[in-house]
Image (tube, helix red, strand yellow):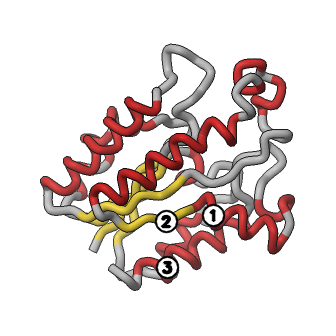
Amino acid sequence: MSVVVLGDSITRSYGVPEGQGWVELLAKRKPAIKWINAGENGNTSAEGLARFQRDVDPHLPAVVILEFGGNDPVNNPDRRVSPEEFKNYLEQMIDRIKARGGDCILAVFPALVDSLHATATDPYFISKGGLDKVIGEYRALTKGIAKKYHLRLVDFEELSRTWMRRFGQEKIISSDGIHWTPVTNRLAAREISKFLKTL
């Protein structure tokens, strides 16, 4: 069995020492499974779709975890992915996975802390109530697509907010307001490990 995780810096585990990201920790927990970390820092769903043929197709059929939505509303007209486009791109990836006999799991983009994030002083996001609120629409779409396709869903938003309440924000979210600490990666690996038992 192979599991491909296609996503952004949350998947890549930006900022933590090599080998301590949640995908790599899962590879240690579940050595019988071939794990492929296809996360790219800063990626939107459009950029994920653009490298799908390179990073996912060679491993199909497989279980594919898709984790996007945090970079799609970027304040850059050339890269910004609208909610409608996000839905379309995610569904294209799901259709391609299913057509090749694969199984798909969707991951909801986790919570972030607006006051610490680089967009905290960006008038574009301030006018919209902050980046975390803007990403909320993409999170809702991810959940809706999972329901439409009857897919399993990993709600990283709910999990990360629960962890922040339980352990404190500073232990869960790094000082940039968005990326996960080594503690969070360990928690995520534990949750996904339990989740995979349902497959």
Q: Amino acid at mark 1?
A: Glu
Mark identifier at residue 70: none
Mark 1 Cα within 10 Å, few/some/many (few <14, many 20+)?
A: few
Q: CA distance from mark 3 to mark 2?
A: 11 Å
Q: Can you see residue 38?
A: no
| Quadrant housing the C terminus | bottom left
Which structural element holds mark 2?
strand
Q: CA distance from mark 3 to mark 1?
A: 17 Å
Q: Is residue 83 left or right of residue 76?
A: left
Q: Amino acid at mark 3?
A: Ser
Give the residue drawn at x 29%, y 44%.
Answer: 91
Give the residue drawn at x 41%, y 78%.
Answer: 196
- Residue 192: horizontal and vertical position, in percent? 50, 74
Q: Amino acid at mark 2?
A: Val
Which structural element holds mark 1?
helix
Q: Which residue is mark 3?
A: 193
Which residue is more in the foreground, 153 or 63? Answer: 153
What number of labels is visible? 3
- Residue 154: horizontal and vertical position, in percent? 49, 65
Q: Is residue 143 above or below residue 159?
A: above
Identify the mark nearer the N-term, 3 or 2. 2
Q: Which residue is mark 2?
A: 154
Q: Is residue 47 left or right of residue 60?
A: right
Give the residue drawn at x 49%, y 83%.
Answer: 194
- Residue 162: horizontal and vertical position, in percent? 72, 69
Which structural element holds mark 3?
helix
Q: Which residue is mark 1?
A: 158
Identify the mark nearer the N-term, 3 or 1. 1
